[in-house]
Every structure is written in C-alpha cells, then in structure tokens.
Image: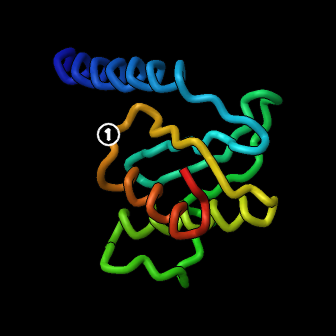
C-alpha cells in the first residue's frame, strides 16, 4: 500500500515542481492573459487569467462543452479537450482578447493538453 501512495506522491510532486518552473516565467495580463490548464482523469478545465489583477477573465470545462464543435479526427477525451480550448477561445474573443500566454500546468505538451492548445488556436487565440 505504501508503495502505491509513494508513487502517487512523487508523480504529484514532479508535476508541482514542473508547474512552479513554468509559472516562474509565465505571467498573464489583461491584454494577454495566461491560459491555464488543469487535466484530471475525468475531464479538462481551462481558464484565461489576468495575474496582475488576480482575476479569471474566461473559463471553460468539459461540463460546459458544446458537442457541436467539430474536433476533426480526434476522439474521446482528446476531442473533448479540443472543444474546451475552442470554447475558451470563443469566450475570450467575446471579451476582445486575441492573444494569450500558454501555461501547460506542469503537464507534458502532448495528448489532451496539446488538443486544448490547438482548439484555442483554431478558435482565434494567438500564443
């Protein structure tokens, strides 16, 4: 039992440290917010955050997801992640935000994290 818990803690510690390194460089402003990602086993969440004022400008998650958005050849959770990125980009465009800084949240840039980024780019955000 302790061996499994130990692995989980090291995995969480590794992601936390990686996210801290990313956050030491990435800062969001009102004109160019930080696009922050959170990935869990069940879903995906993304937020556009203004770090200067400490406000969330726009957010999207799998639960809000619009299933009508075409995700191309993607299937399953990757398609949902793409839709989250696209929906976030649409909400940001409604607030006249066209550029963002990508914060991968300590996760590797592949799979669902990459799909969120591609969805946001296809939705009109530049980063």
Q: Position of residue 95 (x, y in %)?
A: 81, 59
Describe residue 70's horizontal placement relative to residue 58 as left or right.
left
Q: Position of residue 124 (x, y in %)?
A: 61, 66
Question: What residue is drawn where x is 32% and y is 73%?
Answer: 75
In the rendered image of this protein, does residue 64 appear above or below residue 34?
Answer: below
Closer to the camera, 34 or 32?
32
In the rendered image of this protein, does residue 86 appear above or below residue 60?
Answer: below
Question: What residue is drawn where x is 40% and y is 70%?
Answer: 79
Callout 1 secondary element: loop
Describe residue 81's horizontal placement relative to residue 47 as left or right.
left
Describe residue 112's horizontal placement relative to residue 89 as left or right.
left
Q: Quadrant of residue 3?
A: top left
Q: Which residue is mark 1?
A: 108
Question: What residue is drawn where x is 57% and y is 56%?
Answer: 126
In the rendered image of this protein, does residue 115 appear above or below residue 38?
Answer: below
Label 1, residues with CA under 10 Å away: few <14, some 14-19, many ≥20: few
Quadrant into which the N terminus falls: top left
Q: Position of residue 5 (x, y in %)?
A: 26, 20
Question: What residue is drawn where x is 37% and y is 80%?
Answer: 72
| Circle count | 1
In the rendered image of this protein, does residue 58 appear above or below residue 13?
Answer: below
Type of colouring: rainbow
């Amino acid at each position: 039992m302790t061996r499994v818990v130990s692995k989980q803690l090291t995995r969480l510690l590794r992601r936390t440290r990686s996210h801290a390194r990313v956050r030491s460089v990435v800062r969001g402003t009102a004109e160019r917010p930080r696009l922050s990602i959170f990935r869990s086993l069940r879903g995906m969440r993304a937020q556009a955050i203004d770090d200067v004022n400490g406000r969330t400008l726009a957010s999207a998650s799998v639960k809000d997801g619009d299933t009508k958005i075409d995700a191309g050849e993607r299937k399953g959770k990757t398609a949902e992640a793409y839709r989250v990125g696209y929906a976030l980009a649409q909400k940001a465009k409604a607030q006249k935000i066209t550029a963002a800084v990508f914060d991968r949240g300590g996760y590797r840039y592949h799979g669902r994290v990459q799909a969120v980024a591609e969805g946001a780019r296809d939705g009109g955000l530049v980063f």
